[in-house]
Image (cartoon, rainbow, N blue to C red):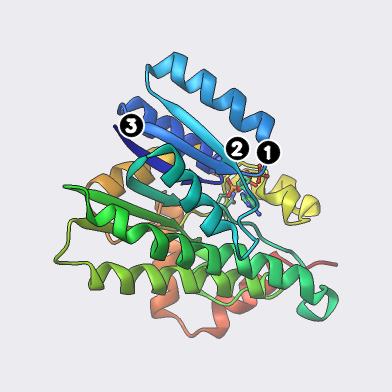
Amino acid sequence: MKFALITGASGGIGLCIARELAKRKNNLLLVARSTDKLKTICSELEKEFAIKADYLSVDLSNPLATQTVVEWLHTKSYAVDTLVNNAGYGLWGRVDATPADQLNNMMQLNMNAVVNMCHAMLPELKKQPKAYIMNIASTAAYQAVPTLATYAASKAFVVLFTRGLRRELKDSNISVTCVSPGATTTNFIDRAGMEAMKERAEKFSMAPEAVASIAVNGMLKGKAEVLPGFTNWFSVQLTYFVPKFIPEKIAEGLYKTN
Ligand SMILES: NC(=O)c1ccc[n+]([C@@H]2O[C@H](COP(=O)([O-])OP(=O)(O)OC[C@H]3O[C@@H](n4cnc5c(N)ncnc54)[C@H](OP(=O)(O)O)[C@@H]3O)[C@@H](O)[C@H]2O)c1
């Protein structure tokens, strides 16, 4: 029996990706911190889609977390053919106004956990006839974003890491896709401390269900990069053609903290 492993599957985009994969009869392994949510989601998805689902509650910002995941898979003899690195969050605020330990925790989850999970899972994924990796970045990855400087840079890392890994694996059984959503209606805004932007953000936000459907279709088609939604796609294309200071200045105005 094969499984798709999804990090950050207790809510938001990750949960919607889990549902999309369950619809396609994938068995699921869901990873996040919220035990109760994961437990409920697993039993609901098992019933609704007649699949098998299990969960592991672990804090992926802990540098030892990947080892915990691998040991769990080994103990349960779970075979994995799809890895979705979705867990991540943002922190709104100037660098000089944010404690360094908070920045480091975010960087650990957004970057190191993604690399560690890919690294740890590659031997398992290589055993499968066909396998997929999907890493979730952001449209913020394509330009510098003042007051989200570290978050945007961490997502730029995900884009370049994912593209590099994809090239390394181009002659293998593993297809690697980077998905960069724009504003999406999830818990992201609250976790990032961006409540003041909520009303404005919601006007431009996509539903996580739509993002997940586009993401999974793109992954299964073997796309290198997926930018869900025309506006998100278009805004990223602009960053290739205009001087860098223009999108930076626009972002500075949009994300001003006071
Ligand atoms: N929403 C947006 O506007 C937006 C835009 C671009 C990119 N993204 C990216 O999309 C991805 C999903 O975010 P979302 O919008 O769906 O946000 P969300 O609703 O806050 O969901 C985040 C998920 O990650 C899990 N998570 C957070 N910290 C974790 C940790 N330390 N260890 C393990 N799991 C952890 C959360 O579960 P627990 O709390 O249970 O651990 C939750 O399942 C993120 O990588 C985010 O950067 C979001």
Residue at 70%, 72% (x, y): give it.
104
Q: Judge whether residue 77 can be spotted in this image.
A: yes
- Which of disc 3 and disc 2 is earlier in sequence? 2
Could you tell me if the residues under marks 1 and 3 are in contact, i.e. CB atoms within 8 Å? no
The answer to whether 62 is drawn above or below residue 146 in the figure is above
| Residue type of the residue flagged with mark 1 | Ser
The residue singled out by tag 3 in the image is 26
Q: In this orientation, which residue lies closer to the viewer: 113 or 155?
A: 113
How packed is label 1: few (under 14 Cα within 10 Å), some, or many (20 or more)? some
Q: Can residue 211 be seen in this view?
A: no
Judging from the image, what secondary structure is the residue with disc 2 in? loop
Q: What element carries label 1?
A: loop
**Does the Cβ of the disc 2 residue fall within 8 Å of ligand 1?**
yes
Q: Name the residue under label 1.
A: 34
Mark 2: few/some/many CA within 10 Å (<14, 14-19, 20+):
some
User: Is the C-beta of the residue carrying label 1 under 8 Å from the nearest atom of ligand 1?
Assistant: yes
* Cβ at disc 3 under 8 Å from ligand 1: no
